[in-house]
Amino acid sequence: MESAAQAPDQQVQQEQTFDVIVIGGGAVGENAAGRAVQGGLSVVLVEAELVGGECSYWACMPSKALLRSTQALRAARSVDGAAQAVTGELDVAAVLARRDSFTSGWKDAGQARWLEDAGIALVRGHGRINGPKEVTVTAADGSTTTLTARHAVTIATGSAAAIPEVEGLHESHPWTSREGTSVQIVPRSLAIIGGGVVAAELATAYAAFGAEVTLLARSGLLGGMEPFAGELVAEALQAQGVSLRLNTSPQRVSRSAEGVRIETEEGDPLLVEEVLAATGRAPRTADLGLESIGLEPGTWIDTDDTLRVLGFDWLYAVGDVTHRALLTHQGKYQARAAGDVIAARAQGRRIDDSPWGAHVATADHAAVPQVTFTDPEVASVGLIASAAREAGHRIRVVDYALGDVAGSALHADGYTGQARMVVDEDRRVVLGMTFVGPDVAELLHAATIAVSAEVPLDRLWHAVPAYPTINEIWLRLLETYGRPGEQTLNGLS
Amino acid sequence: MESAAQAPDQQVQQEQTFDVIVIGGGAVGENAAGRAVQGGLSVVLVEAELVGGECSYWACMPSKALLRSTQALRAARSVDGAAQAVTGELDVAAVLARRDSFTSGWKDAGQARWLEDAGIALVRGHGRINGPKEVTVTAADGSTTTLTARHAVTIATGSAAAIPEVEGLHESHPWTSREGTSVQIVPRSLAIIGGGVVAAELATAYAAFGAEVTLLARSGLLGGMEPFAGELVAEALQAQGVSLRLNTSPQRVSRSAEGVRIETEEGDPLLVEEVLAATGRAPRTADLGLESIGLEPGTWIDTDDTLRVLGFDWLYAVGDVTHRALLTHQGKYQARAAGDVIAARAQGRRIDDSPWGAHVATADHAAVPQVTFTDPEVASVGLIASAAREAGHRIRVVDYALGDVAGSALHADGYTGQARMVVDEDRRVVLGMTFVGPDVAELLHAATIAVSAEVPLDRLWHAVPAYPTINEIWLRLLETYGRPGEQTLNGLS
């Protein structure tokens, strides 16, 4: 077998045929490649920019690095006895330098070394599908390499910021999440267009850095999450000095020597140093050669639960391009299933594609976790109440104030937060959980296990939360729901 | 029914017969009483000291209050950008004042009000069993009240610090956890005898308060936990300035005007301002009248899994006195089962006493969670590797450095920690998990759910940890264990 494992650099030139071609070397592509190699296949990865992708350089990692120092400082300030020791201010230059270390200064040597160690060949350049199982890679110098796959081609090109159609916006060179996370000089003022996770996180970060931040959102914040999430984050952002303009849209944008001028439906025009568009994502599929195989360029790619593209037996897609769940960890999850199933199919092994099997991404439908690293944080998994009702579930919603748990009160003075459990009344399992409050990110995985494993409520009573931790919220939610034998006392709501 | 709900204060005198008598009004007794009342029974609670008990005034709550400010400050100091703002020192007086607020100044008016609201009668005084279903309470003024139970008496008197047999120790008036957690003036120097959770937590607290702390332990630290837990905590305590004398025992203790002198098996004698004994717990059963019903005073009380005392149909015990698991949350868990089963038996309802049923404390055997709030924290649930082997399980131990997870690196610069998953190879479920590292307390509940619900490993792959959180350790542990189809590549260890 012409394995790429021994000397990938040389073999890229010599050997154009691999078992698997993965287009896109972000975390998701790397995982798909890694699993396929672990399954015994030879794999080549095609990457046009930096190996490691969006998450490593312009999303998860730098954004969390920009937020963590502020979060730690807020935590210390919120506990009497510690607060007195925090007499200085956030060192913004140090935060940016720390962020630089997490992005390795936007160099991918470390990631490329990981590929080499993992036995994955790397071809740098822009990959385009020519036809079945064939990909042509155009390098920066214009030279091309044509790759052939014996078994599968996997698209993992991700997504890019979608710039909304607003007059003058494109010409005003707006920032996107890329500029927002890779900033070297914090602007004095920043307008953020959007109300989603990226908008809320970057508003939190830049407000802490001392920028005058205005957030313009078409509706409220964090749409798609439980309503109290956006409400609590909106309150907090305002307390952090962010000017919120909700339920409004920019009408006209122009850039001059003075800065960027933004006219909105209501209120005075804004004049800011920079404007950042965080209004969603578009699939990176416009220039992938999809037309050569009968797919429409620029659209999201539909797959089955084994991540195989509908209508193909050799084409797979994982991560953002599938529009299943635009989150790095969920893309990696898909990539593990895809890498494994590609290897299993190539080797004629048994395919485990029943729900929750090893070769399917079932959790994409039922148990997608997400943390928004605002202050308060929002951590959620599974269905929110309204979505569960729309899906036809007979549910009961259980709410509890997170600050009323002893562990929360110990954690921070005046701790404020909210937890919600959405219970499927027919199956008596948890369909969804949402936590909003300071430092709730690590609470989420318990909920993710409960939802994805469909643990019966009766069994969750035996999962005792350690006292006094914030996780005692689980006991409070179960008590609020009520236990068999005393349900008639509590009544159904 | 002569319910005590309407006016408990008056009825205590008028009505001496209740469905249930609970002796001991700590958190555990309160929960047993509360569940029985919710099940429709009348309940009287007997408390000799403060309603709320050890946990509220001299254990969990004050100890965590003493530790939290230091933890928050350490967290801020360990993140560049935030660290620069921490230019002052811990305000010890503020920490003590914060602790006072959590113990309500050692007043139980709030807890007594909770009882009243819950419809639970309260008799203050020392309760002694006279014979079947009869308890005599001796108040502080010497007056007595005799209570009769129609259905059950529940013992929830807890445990007290056991002072070890060391020459002169008792006469030297050593501190116990009570004095350690209720301190008003921090001693200049403190010797702690013991190597368990209380010793390690109080050493952490007092070192942060500026006391010169020496810890004397018969063996290592945190026996009964995975060995790396005690090792990492020992290293950290030394780095925090604690002088550790492990594998040694005090031989002679004496107190003089100069302070407390402690002679040990090895090394120079110690001279300290105070000595604290944290060498385990003794059951509070010595003066309970157990002899009147044929039980031996001063011993732990054996129960079945419905918390009924062996050999009795009317006597129950919950919490520390049972020696099932000396932890408040686990006692509360037992109390919920006991309160429910007492009500169910009284009313002739169906008893659900199969394993993991509503009326049994099955988790006591398999899924007891515990957090040690040292720095690093230790969070563990279920069986450690050695105990699993001793119990005859065919196991595989999966270790992963917690600091190698992206979420940990973001959380704190130089994050160091360790995670261990103990897998039952026959059933392919997790028997135990241990996390050691800064701020791991809230990671535990995910493991508690996985262990108590016996979630198959194959399903845990679908519980995707949100990126980048410390919980990604779950993915790393699963990857290290290996997945079906590539197990032969990883090999068994």
Image (cartoon, coloured by chain):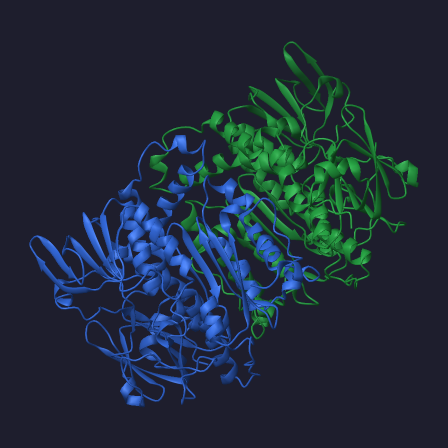
Chain colours: A green, B blue
Q: Which of A230 and B178 is in front in this view?
A: B178
Hey, which quadrant is residue B278 in on the image? bottom left
Q: Residue furthest top?
A: A257
Residue drawn 15% across the image and 63% down it? B173
| Quarter of the image with the C terminus of chain A in it | bottom right
Displayed quadrant of residue B314: bottom left
Q: How many marks?
A: 0
Expressed as whole percent of the image width and height from the top left, the position of residue B207 reads: 27, 47
Would residue A151 be seen by someone viewing this image from the given angle?
yes
- Going by the image, does A456 lie left or right of A466? right
* Percent x, y of residue B110: 36, 59
Residue A35 to residue A171: above or below:
below
Residue B35 is situated, as x and y percent measured from the top left of the image, at 47, 72
Question: Front-most of A403 and B91?
Answer: B91
Q: Where is residue B317 in the image (x, y as percent from the top left)?
A: 39, 78
Q: Is residue A220 visible to us here?
A: no
* Relative to A426, B211 lies left or right: left
| Residue B322, quarter of the rendered image | bottom left
Of A9 and A66, the residue lying toward us: A9
In the orientation shown, which residue stands out farthest toward the left?
A: B257
Q: In this view, does A265 lie to the left or right of B103?
A: right
